[in-house]
Amino acid sequence: MAILLQHQFKPLPADKQVDTCSFLDSVSHIPSFFDCLGSTIFSPIKADITGNITKIRNVYETNPTKFKTLQQILEGEKEMHGPEWPKVGATLALMWLKRGLKFIQVLLQSISDGERDEQNPNHIKVNITKAYEIALKKYHGWVVQKLFQAALCAAPYKDDFLKALSKGQNVKEEECIEKIRQFLVNYTATIESIYIMYNKMNAELDYKA
């Protein structure tokens, strides 16, 4: 769990606003998570996340004071782009980024909850499938969905996945699961806050990629 716990997400303040700089610092380490899945088939998701982080950072750096929180970015771009919003700029990038982050959240939560295929308890296909169906599937066309089905065949065993998360160290499964739960506390709260913000601002789009 070294990959995730070394870059914990910060607790949210009482108003649930997500600080942009802190968010970007934490989320910039997330793409390496997909290396732990052991297959280059997951590379497109990793590349999308990396690209979207860059787009958000580029907007933030144009005016760090004005864009101190993620909500201020959305509000600023709504005013700036008018009818083209929300299908523009950092607003669009964050919309897709949160879906990739949700995929990771559901996957880790499923593993920490002990969900598994009783016939193949060391496989994480059931966990990855659940994460994909909840976070990404409805936004993907037929071709991308088929690519994901191929990726499932290359999914690692759970013990290999947990070892990769621990940067190759042999950590007991119970210890690793406990660290996943620790990581998920602030991570989940941050993602939920972003989803709530998009719903409140009517910034969510349902087109397929």
Image: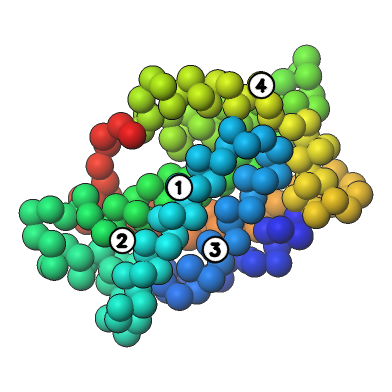
In this view, 15 is above or below 87 = below
Q: Position of residue 3 (x, y in %)?
A: 71, 58
- Residue 48 is marked as 1
Q: Which residue is mark 4?
A: 153
Q: Earlier in the sequence, mark 2 or mark 1?
A: 1
Q: Nearer the viewer, mark 2 or mark 1?
A: 1
Q: Which residue is mark 2?
A: 90
Q: How far apart are the two marked residues, 1 and 3, measured between alpha carbons?
A: 12 Å
Q: Residues within 10 Å of mark 3 (few under 14, many from 20)?
A: some
Q: Earlier in the sequence, mark 1 or mark 3?
A: 3
Q: Amino acid at mark 2?
A: Ala
Q: Position of residue 87 (x, y in %)?
A: 21, 50
Q: How far apart are the two marked residues, 3 and 2, measured between alpha carbons?
A: 15 Å
Q: Residues within 10 Å of mark 4 (few under 14, many from 20)?
A: few
SS label for mark 4: helix
- Residue 28 is marked as 3
Judge by depth and name the residue closer to the eye, 23 or 87.
Answer: 87
Q: Amino acid at mark 4?
A: Cys
Quadrant including the C terminus: top left
Residue at image position (91%, 49%) is 170
Residue at image position (26%, 34%) is 207
Judge by depth and name the residue closer to the eye, 146 or 25.
Answer: 146
